[in-house]
Image: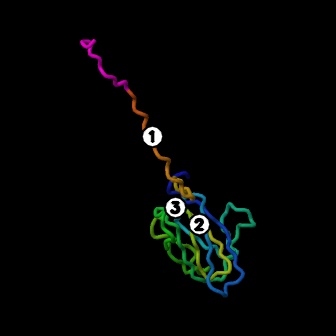
Amino acid sequence: MAGESAMELLFLDTFKHQNTEQGSNVDVVRFPCVVYVTEVRVIPPGVRAHSSLPDSRAYGETSPHTFHLDLFFNNVTKPSATVFDRLGSLEYDENNSLIFRPSTKVNTDGLVLKGWYNCLTLAVYGSVDRVIINHERDSPPPPPPPPPPPQHQQIGMKRNPKHG
């Protein structure tokens, strides 16, 4: 299961919002390292989210029954980008549209979710990238050490033994 093609649960949580009358909600998923996202699932209410989880977190709570969900990702191949790239969208319907699969291979360390939902139970599947990305900007490398001082040779005047 350590192969690159192995799909594993990378994230599972429920986002809850009190008031949706003011507009859509935005939530952020941060991964501790770079991952390849292969599937995003919205878990309907009462549906078991994942078989290996304790009962308290095992069931979806998503509401309402239908809504539009936009997904964006932090493109780690563009470290200087100031915005997230669009991943796609899902017309969630708890009866027949639960799964979003990106059209291309996406490696990221974060997702942004935007939609008209009160509660969103989300599972993200994929694999962990082997490349480690540091979220803090590294300082530039130190300058190279100065060259060694030149070897001083005694440059003296040659004495001419003929002068005496």
- Residue receiving disc 2: 124
- Residue receiving disc 1: 146
Element assignment for label 3: strand
Q: Is residue 126 above or below residue 146?
A: below
Task: Looking at the image, tell me whether mark 1 or mark 3 is earlier in sequence order.
Answer: 3
- Residue receiving disc 3: 36
Task: Looking at the image, tell me whether mark 2 or mark 1 is earlier in sequence order.
Answer: 2
Task: Looking at the image, tell me whether mark 3 or mark 2 is earlier in sequence order.
Answer: 3
- Label 3 and label 2: CA atoms lie apart by 10 Å
- Please rate how many residues cluster around mark 3, counting C-alpha atoms within 10 Å: few if below 14, some from 14 to 19, many from 20: many
Q: Amino acid at mark 3?
A: Tyr
Q: Is residue 107 magenta?
A: no
In this rendering, position of residue 41 left or right of residue 57: left
Q: Amino acid at mark 1?
A: Pro
Q: Nearer the viewer, residue 22 or 104?
A: 22
Query: Which is the main secondary structure of the residues drawn in magenta?
Result: loop
